[in-house]
Amino acid sequence: MKFGVATFVTDNGIRPGSLGRALEDRGFDSLFLAEHSYIPASRESPYPGGGEMPWMYYRTLDPFVALSAAASTTRNLLVGTGIALLAQRDPLHTAKEVASLDLVSEGRAVFGVGAGWNREEMRNHGTDPSTRGALLNEQLAAVTRLWTEEEAEFHGKFVDFERVHARPKPVQRPHPPIYIGGESAAALRRLDEHGNGWLPRPDIAPEEIARVRASFSAQGRELPVTIFGAGTDEELLARWAEAGVDRVAFLLRTRQEGETLTELDGLAEIAARFR
């Protein structure tokens, strides 16, 4: 089982280049960064974790800029979004951003996506929360065409464009892996139709992971599984390993560089016991 981290890179924490280098030096294989374009002042949507929204949500950097910086200081570290809010994005621009990240990282990009939860944030981007799942599915299909076809076009209910030339193309073939976040029935359908990997959250039962992996295996398909934002309970880590989890992305708190390096040392010690 491999280990990475999931975190928020902010304007007042460790810089992404330093973080990437520190992760690779300690044997971590991946970095997943969160995305929020902004946080609405209304706070209508409750924070899913309960209580007040943590401060780092208000200060997170653009994930593609930060991941490019992390890629520039590393050689093997996977650089992924965890998760990109594609339903709030333009698919043409996003296809170029992911392909550009894959190019500058020499084939290390991972595109983690999810439907999102902050309804005010969606609405201000022009996204209807009630149809965001259907929109996301069309966007994923459109982005895949933009990556893989020389003259791509798409005509759907939510996404519609005539033939275009979209470059750069990704380094990875046929395209960077698409990791689907979420555990709902809709997310699992999206995983089946559009995903190359799964990003479930740490409260999922290991038995459910084994069940979903078995359903893919019955279709003759492999399903890489990365636990997103995990804690350090070693008994649970062992159960995930038994369920066939490929990677655990520890939740890394957003801190200044010195504190971050100390925390990474502790996480690396735990990871070493499972390698």
Image (cartoon, rainbow, N blue to C red):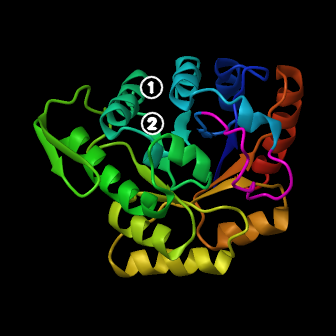
Residue 19, position as x, y percentages in the image? 70, 25
Residue 55 shows which numbered tag?
none
- The residue at the point 63 percent across, 26 percent down is 61
What residue does disc 1 label? 105
SS at mark 1 in the image: loop
When the figure is inspected, residue 34 is found, relative to residue 232, above or below; the finding is: above
Residue 39, position as x, y percentages in the image? 67, 38
| Residue 77 inside the magenta-drawn segment | no
Judge by depth and name the residue closer to the eye, 72 or 272: 72
What residue does disc 2 label? 109
Query: Quarter-wise, where is residue 234 in the image?
Result: bottom right
Residue 117 shown left or right of residue 144 in the figure: right
Q: Residues within 10 Å of mark 2 (few under 14, many from 20)?
A: many
Residue 215, position as x, y percentages in the image? 43, 80
Q: Which residues are magenta?
A: 38-53
Three-letter amino acid code of the residue under disc 1: Ser
Three-letter amino acid code of the residue under disc 2: Ala
